[in-house]
Amino acid sequence: MKKIVRRYIFVLLGVAASGLFYTAVSLSQSSIEEMIVVVPHPVLRQQAVPILADDEETVQLLQEMAEYLEDSVLPKGGISLPQVAVAKRGFVAMIDDEAVIMMNPSLVFTGEEVPSLEGCLSIPQTFGYVNRSAGVTIEYHDEDWIRQTLHLEDLEAFIVQHENDHLNGILIIDKLLAEAPERVRDINMPLE
Ligand SMILES: [Zn+2]
């Protein structure tokens, strides 16, 4: 009898624990989603400031943004700090199916300009072509504050250029090409 009661309590505790876990997961998901600001929010037009080495709060926020991107059902290419109303130079970009945290990035453009079909989490229901460099070399601080260098091409290069524009208050609506050129990317593209 005692054994059965104990087992029953154990099962109940397990259910409660998984409930708590589920709540924690869904809270972090919805909190980033709810933090996303849309045009014409003024933070989207600000020049973002560099992130300082001891800014752990911002690194933690970027980690939550990375989880949000990775767990997203819809395809999403990236999200920048200004899009959650924090005017600091950092973003998360999907590289090789992984959400990579990039702080204080500097970009060197390589290759010719090509049209890229893009959407933006901060500009609902707007898609269009913008010109992007086909390749980019990006230097950034990772979440352990180590300076990294990556060379990216095509979609991944477009994503970091889109996110880097956010750090300078530039949006795709500033760059939309008047005429859509020949389609170069699938319509099921990620939102950035
Ligand atoms: Zn965007």
Image (cartoon, rainbow, N blue to C red):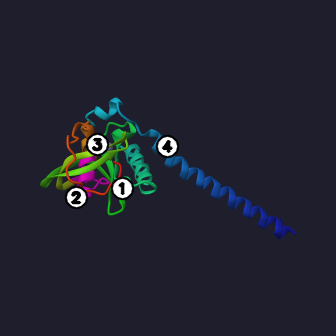
Frontmost of labels 1 and 4 is 1
Say which of 118 and 32 sits in front: 118
**Lower sequence index among marks 2 and 3:** 3
Q: Can residue 53 be seen in this view?
A: no
**Lower sequence index among marks 2 and 1:** 2
Name the spot of residue 41 as percent of width and height, x first: 36, 31
Frontmost of labels 2 and 3 is 2
**Residue under pointer 4:** 31
Cβ atoms at labels 4 and 3 below 8 Å apart: no
Residue span colored magenta: 139-162
Could you give the CA–CA distance between mark 4 and mark 3, rounded to whole angstroms?
A: 21 Å
Residue 146 counted in the magenta span:
yes
**Crowdedness of circle 4 by 10 Å Cα count: few (<14), some, many (20+)?**
few
Cβ atoms at labels 2 and 3 below 8 Å apart: no
**Lower sequence index among marks 1 and 4:** 4
**Residue under pointer 3:** 89
**Crowdedness of circle 3 by 10 Å Cα count: few (<14), some, many (20+)?**
many
Q: Please state which amino acid type lies under the numbered disc 3.
A: Arg
Could you give the CA–CA distance between mark 3 and mark 1, rounded to whole angstroms?
A: 28 Å
**Residue under pointer 2:** 154
Secondary structure type for disc 2: helix
Q: Please state which amino acid type lies under the numbered disc 1.
A: Asn
